Structures are given as C-alpha cells and as structure tokens.
Amino acid sequence: MMKTIYHISRLLLGITFVFSGFVKGQDPLGTMFKIEDYLIAYGWDWALPFALVLAILLCTAEFTIGAGLILNYQTKLMHWSVLLFMLFFTAITFYDALYNTIADCGCFGDAIKLTNWQTFYKNIVLLALVALLFYSSHKANMPSHRRTTLFIVTAIVFAGFSIWSYVHLPVIDFLPWKKGNTISSLNPQSSEYFVKYRNKTTGEEKEFPANNFPYNDSVWMSQWEFVNSRTVNHSSSIDYHLMITDTAGNDVSAYYLNYPDFLFIATIYNLQSAPDKALKKLSRFIENAELEGYTCIILTSALPEDIDNFAQKYSISAQIFNADDIILKMMVRANPGLMLIKNGIVIDKWNVKSLPDYPRIAKKYLNLTDS
C-alpha cells in the first residue's frame, strides 16, 4: 500500500513539475516578464537585469526536479528539493492571493491561466502530495535509483533548449497572436482607448479619449508631445486589443490589421534594450522588402524623440507607430520581433536575432497566390 502511495505521489509531482517547467522554459522571455513583475512588486528593482537568467534557472530547476522524481533519482535530494520549492512558492502565492500583488502568478506560463487563489489551492494539494511522498517513502523504505548521467544530461539539454527558445521563439505559442490566427478578431468592441500627452514646457501630463483631443490644433500640438496610449476593456476576458496610433494620436489599427496584401509588422517593445546588431538586421530586411513593394511598419512604445533618433540612426524608412508594450510582448516574444500578416491573418513570425535573410522569406511566403 505504501509503495503504491509513494509511486502515485512521486509521479503526480514529477509530471506536474515537468509540465510546469516545460511550458515556462520554452517561453523564457514570457517567464522573464513575470519575474520582472514580481521583482517590481516586491521592490527588488536592482535584480531586474538578472531576470532572464533567473527565468532560465528557475524553469531548468523545476523541470529537472520533476525529471528526478519520475526517474526516482536521489530520493532524499529530490524530496527535499520539491519540499523547499513548494514551501517557497506556496508562501508567495498565499501573499499574492491576500494582497493581489500580481494578477496572474504564471505558474503554468500562458498554457493554463489560474487566479491567485486557485494557484494557492493548487499548491496546497501539491504540498499534500509532498507530505505523502515523505511519509510513504519512509514507511516503505523506497530505494533510490542512480541515473546520474541521465539526470545531468536532462538538466543541460533543457537549459540549452530554453536558451534556444529565447534566441528563436517558443516552440508552442499559447498566446492569441500565434501563427494562423486572425488578429483583427482580437479587438473587443467593448473597449475605450486613451492617449496621454505631456506639455513640453511644464511637464504636465494629460490623458484624453483617443477620438477627442485637439490634434487638429497645430499650436497645441507644438506645445505637447505624445507619451503613450492605453486600452480599457470592459469585458471580462483578457484584453488583447492592439491599438496602433500615429504621432498625432490617430488610431490606424483597422487599416493595418485588415491590410489586404502582405504586411510586415516589426515589434520593438523596448528600444533602449533592443540589441544594435538585431536593429541593423531589421533595417536591412525592411529596406529589401520595401524595394520589392511590400509594406512594412514598426510598432513600439517609445517616446517620439527616441523614435526619431532610432529612425535616423538605422536609416528607417518604414512608418513607425505607437502601441502598448504589453501587447507588443504578446505579439512576438522578441525584442525586436517580426510578424508577417495578410488580410489580418498571421502568416508567420520571427525573432529578429534569428531572422532568415529576406530572399528566403520572400521565396517561401511572398510568391504565394491567393487561394
């Protein structure tokens, strides 16, 4: 009986940890975003530069602990590892559930969304399995199977896989902007759109409805500069709305999200942290695409002066628009990223760091004829 309880507890915990580690590890950038949210919420901004490394280490640790449980490797080490792991994260999720510091803990990445209380209750169940694991292994005196080489190889391979996913894109895209989806359908009708402007002299900031601010007043526009835009979704679903605005704050989303021809959309959620090499590569790609008559636009959340400096430095001829950085992070898990759409449907997307040369993409996609 104790052997049965032991093996059931071990396998359930192992499978849960492997699944959780995999869905987060194959999307290390998304896990990094979640870790950054936690670091900011707890006032540990000094650790933000280490968020990506922490994401890869966390996912690798979670995956290998799960693999160790499934392999029944080094039982004492694995049992204490899973116990400490669960105690730490149960405490965090309990605090989150009480004070709602983070809306979604991201314990299963974007594969499964849980509320903070659901996450806490899930962790209580897992802690109960850990207790059964300790109790049954002690009573049944379960032996440890040594598979050291396989365990070490598993850890190394998974860490390498997570790094590969960072350089490219997640193997499985759980977000609504995945290949084959119609992005224009992601825009809910029950939403309000706002733009914020800053007075260039006083620094005062004001927010206006996107369709009701003095953009036709040239004097006013010369005195105020665009800061950002935001969307308020009044539906109960998660807001995936992409609002594309020009420098005057005009919403041009409908035009581009339903563009009838091939359209390249480059996403740069943070201009300051985007690698110089990748931005040069993106600039060359856009130049080649535009030479053949294809439309390219760039979406970023940067301020107007940063956009101007970027366009001049990299000789960008494509139009550059503003969009919310959270949505840009969802569209392509890269900075910068590139998406190809047609008639509002996502044809494909790439991390610019590993972007193929333009001729290869043109040969594969742009010579397609309408079906």
Image: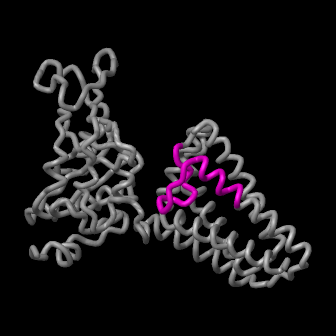
In the rendered image, the quadrant that contains the C terminus is bottom left
Part of the protein shown in magenta: 103-125
Residue 55 sits above or below residue 324 on the image: below
Q: Relative to 324, is 256 on the left or the right?
A: left
Residue 79 can be seen, yes or no: yes
Count every numbered label the image shows and give the total: 0
Its colouring scheme is one colour
Q: Relative to 366, is 56 on the left or the right?
A: right
- Farthest residue toward the top? 202
Q: Is residue 157 magenta?
A: no
Residue 270 can be seen, yes or no: no
- Farthest residue toward the front? 1
Q: Looking at the image, which residue is at 60% across and 40% down? A: 46
Q: Looking at the image, which residue is at 38% across and 54% down? A: 330
How far across and how far down the image is residue 15, in percent? 64, 73
How far across and how far down the image is residue 41, in percent? 57, 38
In terms of image quadrants, where is residue 80?
Answer: bottom right
Q: Looking at the image, which residue is at 32% across and 38% down? A: 231
Q: Relative to 282, is 72 on the left or the right?
A: right
How far across and how far down the image is residue 355, in percent? 31, 68
Q: Looking at the image, which residue is at 35% across and 59% down? A: 176
In terms of image quadrants, where is residue 108?
Answer: bottom right
How far across and how far down the image is residue 184, in percent? 22, 54
Residue 80 sits above or below residue 103 on the image: below
In the rendered image, the quadrant that contains the N terminus is bottom right
Q: Is residue 111 magenta?
A: yes
Residue 240 sits above or below residue 210 on the image: below
